[in-house]
Amino acid sequence: MRRLVGWARRVGGNAACGPVAVLSGRTEELVVGAGSLVVKQHPQPVPRATLLLADRRRDIFVPPLAASEVGGWPVTLWPRGVPVREADLHGPGPWAAAGGLLATLHRTPAPPGTPPCGAPARVERALDRLAAGPPGFRSKIICDALGTVRVPHARPTTLVHGDFHLGQVVSLGGARRLIDLDTVGLGDPAWDLARMAAWYLAGVVPAEAWTVFLTAYGAAGGPAVVPGADPWPVLDQYARTLAAQTAALAVVNQDLDTAETFVAACRRMLTMAGDR
């Protein structure tokens, strides 16, 4: 961590000379706050096309300040935004902003060199981690539930965030913007609605918030679903996939409350499949 902070201070100057705190420490990834900046260590380099896109579309993304390599790891430096507060979740603001941001992203032309979005690979990594652990009834329920997924064909392909949830929305300079560009790429825009849809179906996201989010997305011209039409023929299969991913990671990380919620959702998926 010292090397990361040292690099941030060499590049970012006084802005990085405030308090230091680890913001995230997942496998092969480290995010550290240093003053008013954030330095992130990545498992793979962020594609140059993605960094250029974020710099060009500052209405959507927090713009990058620098990218380099420290200790053999790719690193990036960013302004530090203010995350959505728990108290804000009771109002429509964050949900509407999230829907609008995603719609704008999905309508943005992809620059040359844009890779595929990282959402499918994230699902695979979660299942690999689950398979590497001890077998159990939860693992079987999750894998069986994922076997019920039938992803729709002939879907639009757009720019996609690839790991969207409200933790990826921050306030900076008086506007809400997206962070964590590692998974940005080309894919079905339904991937970016899938986690919110899964959490809504699991009872984690309130119905009112889901409605605000989806309405704002449609009003801003989001192409993943048809405004006014039933969204579930599209979203159901992606929501199932993200419910299984969430359950798998919760089991692996021994997050018992989340595991209970999403393994139960997977069990309902199996029940619904059996009723068909």
Image: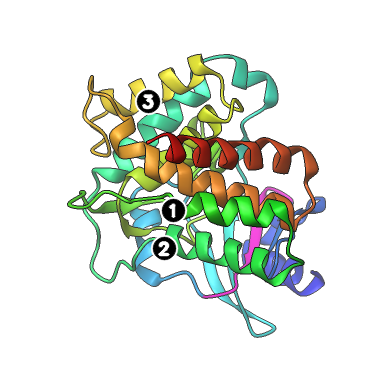
Residue 246 vertical position relative to residue 200 in the rendered view, above or below: below
Residue in the image at 57% along x and 42% along y: 266
Where residue 107 is drawn, which disc sits there? Answer: none
Tell which of 144 and 103 is nearer to you: 144
Dot 2: element: helix
Horizontally, residue 1 falls left or right of residue 8, namely: right
Amino acid at the residue labelled 1: Gly
Res 67 seen here: yes
- Horizontal and vertical percent for residue 62? 49, 48
Q: Which residues are magenta?
A: 35-44
Dot 3: element: helix
Residue 188 vertical position relative to residue 45 in the rendered view, above or below: above
Q: Earlier in the sequence, mark 1 or mark 3?
A: 1
Per the image, is 157 magenta? no
Query: Counting other residues with Cα less than 10 Å from the Cα at mark 2, is it few (<14), some (14-19), or many (20 or more)?
Result: many
What residue did someone put label 3 on? 214
Where residue 162 is drawn, which disc sits there? Answer: 1
What residue did someone put label 2 on? 51
Residue in the image at 31% along x and 36% along y: 103
Tell which of 247 and 31 is nearer to you: 247
Tell which of 14 and 220 is nearer to you: 220
Amino acid at the residue labelled 3: Leu
- Horizontal and vertical percent for residue 30? 70, 64
Q: CA distance from mark 1 to mark 3?
A: 17 Å
Dividing the image into 4 quarters, which one contains the C terminus? top left
Query: Which circle, 3 or 2, is nearer the viewer?
Result: 3
Query: Which circle, 1 or 2, is nearer the viewer?
Result: 1
Residue 90 vertical position relative to residue 72 in the rendered view, above or below: above
Residue in the image at 41% along x and 38% along y: 193
Horizontally, residue 72 falls left or right of residue 244, namely: right
Amino acid at the residue labelled 2: Leu
Q: Residue furthest left?
A: 154
